[in-house]
Image (tube, rainbow, N blue to C red):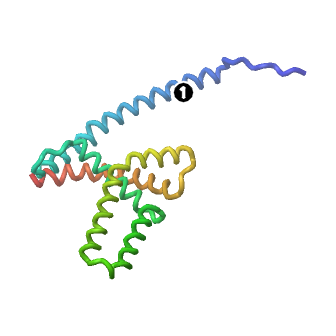
Amino acid sequence: MTEQKKPIWRPSVIVAILLSWLGLAGLSDAFVEWKDWFEFGVMNHWRALKTWLLQWVPFKVPFWFVDYIVLSAVFNRSYLSADDYTPLKSIRKILEEADAESEEMTSATLFVAKALIAILFILFAILAWPFLLVNITVQNLCGKASPVHRSALKAFTVSVLTFIPILFVLTNEILPMMN
């Protein structure tokens, strides 16, 4: 016996297509509403906080620089807090070796060496974080990320998302009392 082919345009297929279109329309509508809430809610509060913070600085600081530094601090805090972070371990080892050889170095020279290493590491972390974020995001999407990278990306996401309620409290409750 030969199997009889079912027609392509069965009623269930037509209903499924119509429901998927409705679902897509609902998703795009929700996205537009979320975008409006984010733009007019979160971003207005963030701009107000930046304006308030930058009014105390005696020189002009571009808004984009504040955004970059804040995101850098959030990312680096979440990325560097991982115990297995190899470059941070290497720097700690260098500093411990410098302490061991401190008999030959004066305390001022040792302090300057440690401060220089710390400053260079902080500058590298501030400049490199966007590339590291893209790298660990791609690794996570491909399923090739190490546990350290997975936890760093999770910590970064949680930090950014938990900042939103703090931002609303700061701009709605605390800043009006300070002005």
Q: In what quadrant of the picture does the N terminus appear?
A: top right
Relative height, residue 37 to residue 4 (above, below): below
The front one of 92 and 137 is: 92
Q: Is residue 18 left or right of residue 31?
A: right
Where residue 24 appears, x then y in whole percent?
49, 28
The amino acid sitting under disc 1 is: Ser
Q: Nearer the viewer, residue 118 or 59?
A: 118
Q: How many marks?
A: 1
For the point 42% across and 70% down, the residue is 93
In the depicted view, which residue is nearer to us: 35 or 11? 35
Q: Quadrant of residue 111?
A: bottom left
Q: Quadrant of residue 4?
A: top right
Q: Look at 31% across and 39% down and name the residue there.
A: 38
- Please state if 11 lies on the left or on the right of 172 as rendered: right
View extreme (right): residue: 1
Q: Which residue is mark 1?
A: 20
Residue 19 at what x, y percent from top left? 54, 26
Q: Say which of 77 and 1 sits in front.
A: 77
Q: Residue at x 29, y 60 (%)?
A: 119
- In the displayed structure, 21 sits above or below 173; it is above
- Position in image of residue 155 (x %, y %): 42, 55
Residue 3 image-quadrant placement? top right
Image vertical order of residue 28 relative to residue 98, above or below = above
List x then y, in percent, for residue 31: 40, 33
Position of residue 138 relative to residue 102, above or below, is: above
Secondary structure of the residue carrying tag 1 is: helix
Q: Residue at x 45, y 26 (%)?
A: 25
